[in-house]
Image (cartoon, helix red, strand yellow):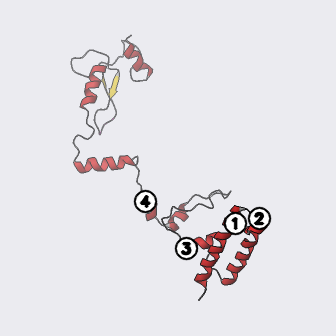
């Protein structure tokens, strides 16, 4: 038995047995074993045509999947193939409400803090509220109360002169000024 035929058998591309039930190359006039499969056409990928090594190489070199298709059909096929023949759409077109309705939820709360991708840049007031660990809407009394709590916790004197605490204190003070300037008439 030839080596190429044994390899074809090992990979399941040739029939078992060397002589009885063997496939002949489908190229007219060729008496070699048809150990290598090739698709019949783009529309009929199976059943296969069977060729010897030399003729399957010739067949593959001449193969054109897009033969008989217009330019628009080729372009459409290529576009479908880039997403594995599945429809897709940008997430931004769906909207936050639809994203929230379809997002994965679980009983353990692992995905509870998930947020959709956002292109929204927070305003200075929104960033200031984040620093103060508050959510809008807020009142002057709420902001003052939260500011006092954070200042007690992060004041440099209360933290032994720690530089990180000092920087956090400065950030909190700036955020407080920003929020209070928007709340004051």
Q: Whole-Å distance between the Cαs marked 3 and 2?
A: 28 Å
Residue at mark 2 to residue at mark 1: CA–CA distance: 9 Å
Residue marked by disc 2: 159
**Residue linked to disc 4:** 90
Left or right? Give the position of 101 relative to 168: left
Span highlighted in magenta in the image: 41-45
Give the mark toward the camera: 3 or 2.
2
* Callout in the foreground (4, 2): 2
| Circle 4 crowding by C-alpha within 10 Å: few under 14, some 14–19, many from 20 | few
The residue indicated by pointer 1 is 166
Task: Please state the horizontal and vertical placement of residue 53, each as a whole percent of the image.
Answer: 31, 20
Quadrant hosting residue 100: bottom right
Mark 2–mark 1 CB contact (< 8 Å) = yes
Q: Secondary structure at mark 2?
A: helix
In this view, the residue in front, 155 or 8, is 155
Location of residue 40 by image quarter: top left
Label 3 to label 4: alpha-carbon separation: 29 Å
- Label 3, label 1: how far apart the Cα atoms are: 21 Å
Q: Are marks 3 and 4 in contact (CB under 8 Å)?
A: no
According to the picture, the residue beneath numbered tag 3 turns out to be 124
Q: Is residue 43 magenta?
A: yes
């Amino acid at each position: 038995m030839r080596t190429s035929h044994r390899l074809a058998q090992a990979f399941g591309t040739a029939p078992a047995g060397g002589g009885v039930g063997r496939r002949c190359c489908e190229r007219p006039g060729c008496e070699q074993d048809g150990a290598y499969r090739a698709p019949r056409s783009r529309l009929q990928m199976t059943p296969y045509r069977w060729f010897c090594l030399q003729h399957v190489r010739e067949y593959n070199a001449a193969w054109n999947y897009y033969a008989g298709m217009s330019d628009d059909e080729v372009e459409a096929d290529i576009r479908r193939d880039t997403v594995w023949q599945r429809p897709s759409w940008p997430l931004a077109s769906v909207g936050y409400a639809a994203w929230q309705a379809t997002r994965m939820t679980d009983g353990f709360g692992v995905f509870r803090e998930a947020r959709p991708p956002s292109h929204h840049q927070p305003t200075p007031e929104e960033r200031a509220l984040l620093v103060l660990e508050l959510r809008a809407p807020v009142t002057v009394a709420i902001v003052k109360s939260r500011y006092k709590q954070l200042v007690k916790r992060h004041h440099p004197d209360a933290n032994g002169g720690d530089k990180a605490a000092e920087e956090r204190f400065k950030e909190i003070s700036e955020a407080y000024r920003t929020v209070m300037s928007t709340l004051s008439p």
